[in-house]
Image (cartoon, grey):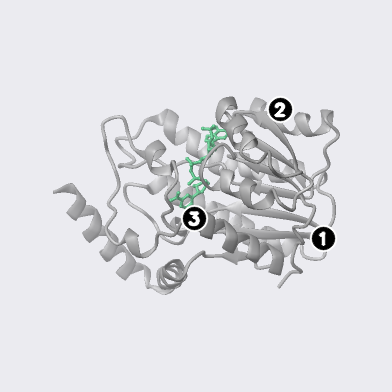
Amino acid sequence: MANGFPLEKCRAIITGASSGLGAEFARQLAPDAEWLVLVARRADALEEVKTNLSSHKVQVHCCVADLATDAGRDAMTAFLDVNGLKPNLLINNAGLGDYGTFASSEAAKTRMQLELNMTALTMLTHAMIPRLQRPGGIINVSSLASTLPMPALAVYAATKSYVTSFSEALAIELEGAGITVTCLCPGPTPTNFSKTAKRADGTDTDRDGQGLLRIPPSQVVRLALEGVNTGRPCVFPGTGVIVAGTLFRLMPRWIMRRVLRGRFNKGKV
Ligand SMILES: NC(=O)c1ccc[n+]([C@@H]2O[C@H](COP(=O)([O-])OP(=O)(O)OC[C@H]3O[C@@H](n4cnc5c(N)ncnc54)[C@H](OP(=O)(O)O)[C@@H]3O)[C@@H](O)[C@H]2O)c1
């Protein structure tokens, strides 16, 4: 296991910090951090997160950028360089999903998932490794969905599979380079995720069994930061998520397909 990354006086970039897990990372890091850069598209929502941190001494910078585009990603790195900000922690958290079948999906939303969940995370990591001060840390927010194929959430689950695979390999590459990589695989968590993933026609997801896995964002982030502190390469937050993740990864693929087919067909009736 890699050495842990000490969070005291950290200088962190948090993508997708305007709501949900990203805003929670900002709240939990604020008491100890030197500065935070909050990145997302909605300036007003970022300013609200910043205002809520004003009781702490931490300096908070808001960087408005659409990370699903090359221009937005370049704007984020330029923001750091222009302001002379040298981070030691990158939290690749921005991401989105899309409930419904692939055949009925909108091409633009599919492309956005690929761009944000995979390309942004990869290219920002590439741009930040030379900029990260040592000891440094990278947290990549993946999902429990990375452990299984998910009909009616197919592209999202595949992008998160990529994130987990990429992060675990990178953690090994960067061992000894002074950068700890932690992959966070949350289960269903109450944030704006579902609102964004729902389609305009109301297409939603099958929530059967999700109650056993759901824990609040505050607990997900607390467990993630504990994992970073102790140098764990992969964090499955919560007992239900640990059990489910272990089961999904060990289950023979043919049994997995049978279970998923049954669940998918049930949803169609
Ligand atoms: N909630 C869950 O059940 C769950 C489970 C497992 C994993 N996750 C993962 O957790 C991460 C955080 O999601 P969340 O649950 O906190 O959902 P959320 O509340 O919807 O937050 C998503 C964040 O991403 C930002 N974002 C979306 N598109 C962006 C873009 N093009 N450029 C820059 N920022 C963008 C959003 O801000 P703007 O709209 O202001 O840009 C927002 O701050 C995601 O990677 C998600 O896949 C969530």
**Residue 227, horizontal then vertical, whole percent:** 64, 65
Check the image and report above or below for 189 versus 23.
Answer: below
Q: Quadrant of residue 37?
A: top right
The total number of labels drawn is 3
- For badge 2, the amino acid type reads Ala
Q: Residue at x 49, y 58 (%)?
A: 186
Residue denoted by label 2: 75
Lower sequence index among marks 3 and 2: 2
Asked whether residue 67 is in view, the answer is: no
119 relative position to 98: left or right: right
Label 2 SS: helix
- Is the residue marked by circle 2 packed among few (<14), some (14-19), or many (20+) residues within 10 Å? some
- For badge 1, the amino acid type reads Gly
- For badge 3, the amino acid type reads Ser
**Residue 267, horizontal then vertical, whole percent:** 20, 51
Please identify the quadrant where the N terminus is shown.
bottom right
The residue carrying mark 3 has its beta carbon less than 8 Å from ligand 1 = yes
Lower sequence index among marks 1 and 2: 2
Residue denoted by label 3: 143
Q: Residue at x 77, y 51 (%)?
A: 10
**Residue 34, horizontal then vertical, whole percent:** 79, 46
Please tell me which residue lies in front, 237 or 74.
Answer: 237
Toward the front, the furthest residue is 55
Check the image and report above or below for 14 versus 223.
Answer: above
- Mark 3–mark 2 Cα distance, whole angstroms, equals 27 Å
| Disc sitting over residue 178 in the figure | 1
The residue carrying mark 1 has its beta carbon less than 8 Å from ligand 1 = no
